[in-house]
Structure formats: C-alpha cells, structure tokens
Amino acid sequence: MSRRARALLRGPTSEAAAALLGWRIERSLDDGSVVRGRIVETEAYPPGDPASHAYRRRTSRNASMFGPPGIAYVYLIYGMHWCLNVVTESEATASAVLVRGLDVVEGAAGPARLCRVLDVDGRLDGTDLLDPTSPLRLLPPARRPVEPVVVTTRIGITRAADLPLRYYLLGSAGVSRRDRAAERALSSG
DNA sequence: TCAATGATTAGC
DNA sequence: CTAATCATTGAT
C-alpha cells in the first residue's frame, strides 16, 4: 500500500502535488488520540525552483529536502508558524510539496494553521510519513477526489511567482485562498 | 558578527 | 493594510 505512495512521490513534484489531493494525513498525539485530515491544497517546489528553500544549497534547515521521498520537511516561518512538506523525487533532487490545506473536522485552512491543528512542529522534521508506526502518516484515499482540481499560482513567494504550481480541490473549506478566475476558467472550459 | 528576509496569520 | 516574532541565511 505504501508502494503506491512511494511510486507517486518518486515522480515529478508538480504531478505529486496534484496527485496528493484527497490523500489523508494522520497524526497520533501523545495522549493517544488521532487527528485526521484530507489534503485539499498543495504547492509544488520542484528541483531548480527559485522559490524553493533548497534552491541555493543544502543547509541545516533544508536538509530533509535532500532526503528520500516520503519524509517530512517541517520548517518554521516568520518566527512563529510551522509548515509541513512531503519530500519528493530523490535524494539527488531536493524537492517537496507544501501541504497548504486540510479538511479536518473543523477545517484547517493555510499551511501554518494546519500544523497547529495537527500539532506538527520541528520535532517531526525528517519523519517517515510512509511508515505506519510514525506519529505522522500519509495515507492514500480510497478513491480519487470527485471535485475538480483548480490549478493556480503559489502564495506568499516573490521568486517564480507566476508558475502554476498550486493545486486545490474546488469547494473545500480547507482551501486557504481561492482563485475565482481560475475557477471560472474551469467551469467555462 | 550583523542586518534582511520570509512557502503566514490575525487583527485593525 | 500592518504587526507579530525569530531562525536562517548571506553578506561583512
């Protein structure tokens, strides 16, 4: 079963970002409870992307991006928010998918709010998301999402800002920011 | 050593 | 629109 996940994550990052829509994130808390969510928004940070944290070189922060596909890259942004990525492709490429939106019970819109809901912080950086015994896991959906996928630009970056590398499920409450124009283009096209 | 900069969010 | 808030980064 994680065979399916590995095959997906070894492929091109943009394809993985789109394909991860509908997948589940499962988090076991220290008190024994489990928080689950459905991925509804992602962004691709492929090899050679000027907006990627791994664009310049390997550093202590981005080290996980140089790890094997399927591990978590968790980093602190703006001195206060954690963000969760799924590492893709291979050790040689340094690439990842930012998980931006999750439909949980209450809904979790935005990459940092999502980490707060899942209690994800730097301690989980490098976690193998495909290991069933990990505290944070990535699980395939039973079926492909029925919702259309909206493809649009990424959020909050300055470099390579025009590339269409953000993906979200139309109509999900957990989507951080909608692109009305892209949604219109979908329905008219 | 030091200043600038964020893959964000909440609150005016 | 701006403040919050600080580790990381790249330049001295």
Image (cartoon, coloured by chain):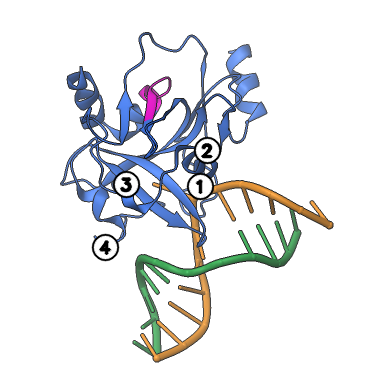
Chain colours: A blue, B orange, C green
- Say which residue appears at 63% left-offset and 13% top-offset: A188
* Comes first in the chain, label 1 or label 4: 4
The stretch of residues the image draws in magenta is A18-26
- Say which residue appears at 57% left-offset and 35% top-offset: A109
Q: Which residue is mark 1?
A: A161
Position of A98 with respect to C2 (left or right) is left
Position of A132 with respect to A111 (left or right) is left
* Comes first in the chain, label 3 or label 2: 3
C-alpha span from label 3 to label 1: 28 Å
Q: Which residue is mark 3?
A: A124
Instruction: Identify the secondary structure beneath mark 2.
Output: loop
- Say which residue appears at 19% left-offset and 24% top-offset: A7
Same chain for mark 2 and mark 1? The answer is yes
Instruction: Identify the secondary structure beneath mark 3.
Output: helix
Q: Is residue A149 magenta?
A: no
Question: Would you place residue C12 above or below residue A51 in this image?
Answer: below
Q: Which residue is mark 4?
A: A60
Q: Which residue is mark 2?
A: A153
C-alpha span from label 2 to label 1: 7 Å
Q: Is residue A152 among what the camera can see? A: yes
**In front: label 3 or label 1:** 3
| Type of the residue with mark 3 | Leu
- Circles 2 and 4: CB atoms closer than 8 Å: no
- Circles 3 and 1: CB atoms closer than 8 Å: no
Q: Position of residue A189 (x, y in %)?
A: 58, 13
Same chain for mark 1 and mark 4? The answer is yes
Most extreme residue toward the front is A31
Report the chain holding disc 3. A
Position of A62 with respect to A119 (left or right) is left
